[in-house]
Image (cartoon, grey):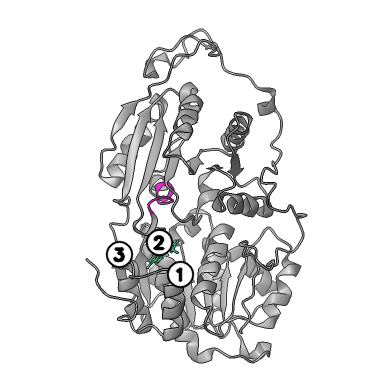
């Protein structure tokens, strides 16, 4: 059991005040372990999944170390970038910067987030006013470096957050270019849910005898998440999903699909059935993704359908349920997906709809998490109006069926033949033009490109 308090960790009063205001009472295990190490100035390699409180684990000691540099001067020269936080996705960038800003609110330190997909010119003026903490996706940071709109020669702290995902997404060359531009004399921190050989190699290359901390087994899934598998034929999944979503537990849920097409198709189907659903995936513009996420966070949308890449880094407090409409083929993605629920000690439910064709992936997942997930056969009411399945021929997958449904032919909806058109289904959120600056609105919870100004 972890009984230390934030005050025991010797955090500065201005940080403690922000934590109290955020309702944090006790440090999470990763915070209790990482904060003293970072305050001592040591490099750190943290094995921590999303949902463990890892953002505060690096952001709090980082802010404390930068406090001597806090300045109320308006001169940009007094606000050079001193800490750089690199993250794989825009969504995570926004969330990390929002956390940094929350924890720094009683200090004079400034933070900013920059990411691709929005007009770079909207970010430059903010960079030029000077910020101590810069949160960035690697590609956009390189754009700024090329345009000489950012200087990194005074960076004293570097964080690579979700490093495994950065490598998965092919950011290694970008990371190397960025690392080469940073002062050698600096403190480096890396967080990763998994420690592959590639990650170990990366840590050897850019860290100096890092202290290793691991809060849970790197591939373990959270204990406070109730996991369940429904064995169901692929063609019955939609009906089962609708049934689960009508249940009492599913006030809000993230539904994961493997492909963008399934995500948009499901969102469309559910919308037609009167469920307030929206999809968030790579084909959507950044603004659409932010709007969809914001509507979901505000409870205006009940169901958010997401692909793995789009969902990476989503930080949604107290999300009670994650549903895997299709289970991921990479077992680690399962851990990331279900980590969207049961955050910071809350309890959550993760339901997976597994077709016979997916059974082999389920075996891999159970091996990885070292847990046998309770399984139940889907109990769907027979309904007369079911579409007909094509007659079984040699290639039919009847040997894979969990039960023998009435023959049906594949449903055909002309909508599936159309190219994907992003839906603007969150009318409560104002719709902006694609290239409009995403500058903070007075009260908006959409934090893109927000410069925290002192005072
Ligand atoms: P993270 O793993 O950094 O994405 O954090 C997961 C969630 O836990 C976020 O919503 C944080 O605001 C929340 N959180 C982080 N640390 C604490 C804490 N010590 N007490 C309560 N909530 C926390």
Residue 22 numbered tag: 1
- Per the rendered image, the range of residues in magenta is 336-342
Instruction: Please check the rendered image and state whether residue 340 is part of the magenta-colored stretch, yes or no.
Output: yes
Q: Residue at x 36, y 69 (%)?
A: 45
View extreme (left): residue:
1
Q: Which of marks 3 and 2 is nearer the N terminus?
A: 2
Residue 192 numbered tag: 2
Q: Quadrant of the C terminus?
A: bottom right
Q: Name the residue under label 3.
A: 214
Lateral position of residue 434 relative to residue 86, left or right: right
Image location of residue 305, percent across then percent down: 55, 41
Q: What element carries label 1?
A: loop
Crowding near pointer 3: few (<14 within 10 Å), some, many (20+)?
some
Q: In which quarter of the image is ligand 1?
A: bottom left
User: Mark 1 near ligand 1 (CB under 8 Å)?
Assistant: yes
Q: Distance between the residues labelled 3 and 1?
A: 25 Å
Q: Earlier in the sequence, mark 1 or mark 2?
A: 1
Examine the image and state in which quarter residue 94 appears. bottom right
Closer to viewer: mark 1 or mark 2:
1
Q: In which quarter of the image is the N terminus?
A: bottom left
Crowding near pointer 2: few (<14 within 10 Å), some, many (20+)?
many
Image location of residue 443, percent across then percent down: 65, 66
Crowding near pointer 1: few (<14 within 10 Å), some, many (20+)?
few
Q: Is mark 3 on a helix, strand or loop?
A: strand
Whether residue 205 is visible here, answered yes or no, is no
Image location of residue 31, percent across then percent down: 35, 71
Image location of residue 63, percent across then percent down: 47, 81
Instruction: Please check the rendered image and state whether residue 6 is part of the magenta-colored stretch, yes or no.
Output: no
Nearer-the-camera pick, 144 or 344:
344
Closer to viewer: mark 3 or mark 1:
1
Q: Which residue is drawn at 58% across and 91% down?
A: 71
Nearer-the-camera pick, 251 or 337:
251
């Amino acid at each position: 059991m972890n009984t230390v308090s934030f005050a025991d960790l010797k955090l500065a009063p201005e940080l403690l005040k922000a934590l109290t205001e955020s309702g944090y009472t006790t440090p999470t295990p990763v915070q209790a372990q990482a904060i003293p190490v970072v305050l001592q100035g040591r490099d750190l390699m943290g094995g921590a999944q999303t949902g463990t409180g890892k953002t505060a684990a690096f952001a709090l000691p980082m802010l404390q170390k930068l406090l001597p540099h806090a300045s109320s001067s308006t001169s940009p020269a007094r606000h050079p970038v001193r800490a750089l936080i690199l993250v794989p996705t825009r969504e995570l960038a926004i969330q990390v910067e929002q956390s940094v800003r929350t924890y720094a609110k009683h200090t004079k330190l400034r933070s900013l987030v920059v990411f691709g997909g929005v007009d770079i010119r909207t970010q430059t003026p903010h960079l030029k006013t000077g910020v101590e903490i810069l949160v960035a996706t690697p590609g956009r940071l390189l754009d700024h470096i090329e345009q000489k709109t950012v200087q990194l020669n005074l960076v004293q702290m570097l964080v690579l957050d979700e490093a495994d995902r950065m490598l998965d997404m092919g950011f290694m060359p970008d990371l190397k270019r960025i690392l080469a531009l940073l002062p050698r004399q600096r403190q480096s921190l890396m967080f990763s849910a998994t420690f592959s050989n590639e990650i170990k190699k990366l840590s050897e290359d850019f860290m100096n005898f890092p202290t290793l901390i691991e809060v849970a087994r790197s591939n373990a899934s959270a204990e406070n998440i109730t996991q369940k598998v429904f064995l169901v034929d692929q063609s019955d999944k939609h009906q089962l999903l609708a049934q689960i979503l009508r249940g009492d537990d599913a006030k809000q849920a993230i539904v994961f699909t493997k492909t963008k097409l399934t995500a948009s198709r499901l969102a469309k189907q559910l919308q037609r059935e009167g469920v307030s659903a929206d999809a968030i995936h790579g084909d959507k513009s950044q603004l659409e993704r932010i709007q969809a996420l914001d509507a979901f966070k505000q409870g205006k949308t009940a169901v958010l359908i997401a692909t793995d890449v789009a969902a990476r880094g989503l930080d949604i407090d107290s999300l009670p349920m994650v549903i895997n409409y299709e289970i991921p083929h990479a077992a680690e993605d399962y851990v990331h997906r279900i980590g969207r629920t049961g955050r910071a000690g809350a309890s959550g439910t993760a339901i997976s709809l597994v077709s016979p064709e997916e059974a082999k992936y389920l075996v891999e997942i159970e091996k990885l998490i070292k847990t046998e997930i309770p399984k139940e056969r889907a109990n769907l009411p027979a309904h007369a109006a079911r579409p007909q399945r094509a007659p079984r021929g040699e290639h039919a997958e009847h040997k894979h069926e969990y039960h023998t449904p009435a023959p049906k032919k594949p449903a055909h909806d002309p909508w599936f033949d159309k190219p994907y058109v992003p839906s603007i289904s969150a009318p409560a959120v104002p719709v902006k033009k694609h290239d409009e600056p995403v500058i903070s609105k007075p009260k908006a919870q959409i934090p893109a490109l927000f410069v925290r100004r002192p005072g």
